[in-house]
Image: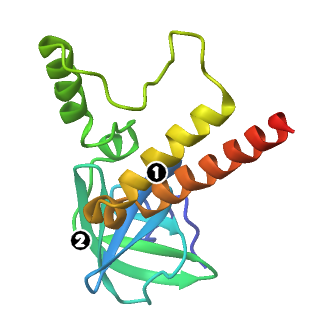
Amino acid sequence: MLNAVGAAGDPRTNARSNVFLTANLVAAGHSRPVRVRNISENGALLDGPDLPAEGSIVQLRRGGLDAAGEVAWTQRGQCGLKFDRPVAVKEWVKRVGHSGQAQVDEMIALVRRSRLAPVETAIADESGGDTLEAISADLAEVCERLASLPDLVAGCPQELSCLDVLACRLQRLADTAGS
């Protein structure tokens, strides 16, 4: 049996970068979050729930990057992808800021320039009135507002779930501290 370190005839002859990146895998119109465990110019090893079957045509998306390909194999929550064309591995492994960061920066600059009232939930209470209860309530309110945005829920389900878990953990801390 040929190995994965560049033996003649092995389709996996390109060097692989061992990584732990988040991405989305799209197959048959369904998008699912995955982790990229390693990537080369010609393919990637992914893990995650509900992976598509061997032979499925897929697109791997990370930030503004997109790679089309086919599932070469799938087994126990992992799958191997073979890309249709080589990808620039350096682009895939570099740190990616969230795609809306420029918009967030612009909005903050606009608020500062126009001296608009700050958002209801301040990041820091300069009066010294921060309490676990107040921070917990602010975080819960932000979570509720975010959860009411359908595009955000569809695009960031894991992140919203994590925020909700963090809000619950903070509330438990607040409850414990208050008793």
Q: Quadrant of residue 5?
A: bottom right
Q: Judge the density around disc 2: few (<14), some (14-19), many (≥20) Cα neighbours within 10 Å.
A: some
Q: Nearer the viewer, residue 173 or 41?
A: 173
Q: Disc 1 vs disc 2: which is toward the camera? A: 1
Q: Position of residue 129 (x, y in %)?
A: 60, 17
Q: Nearer the viewer, residue 155 or 37?
A: 155
Q: Judge the density around disc 1: few (<14), some (14-19), many (≥20) Cα neighbours within 10 Å.
A: some
Give the residue drawn at x 62%, y 47%.
166
Asked whether, in this view, residue 153 is left or right of residue 7, the answer is left
Give the residue drawn at x 24%, y 41%.
100
**Above/below status of 51 relative to 133:** below
Q: Earlier in the sequence, mark 1 or mark 2?
A: 2
Give the secondary structure at mark 2: loop
Q: Nearer the viewer, residue 57 or 134?
A: 134
Q: Quadrant of residue 78?
A: bottom right
Is residue 166 in view from this perspective?
yes
Q: CA distance from mark 1 to mark 2?
A: 39 Å
Kindly identify which numbered label has been placed on residue 107: none
Residue corresponding to mark 2: 84
Which quadrant of the figure contains the N terminus?
bottom right
Which quadrant of the figure contains the C terminus?
top right
Q: Position of residue 19 (x, y in %)?
A: 53, 48
Asked whether, in this view, residue 15 is left or right of residue 41, the answer is right
Give the residue drawn at x 60%, y 77%.
77
Residue corresponding to mark 1: 143
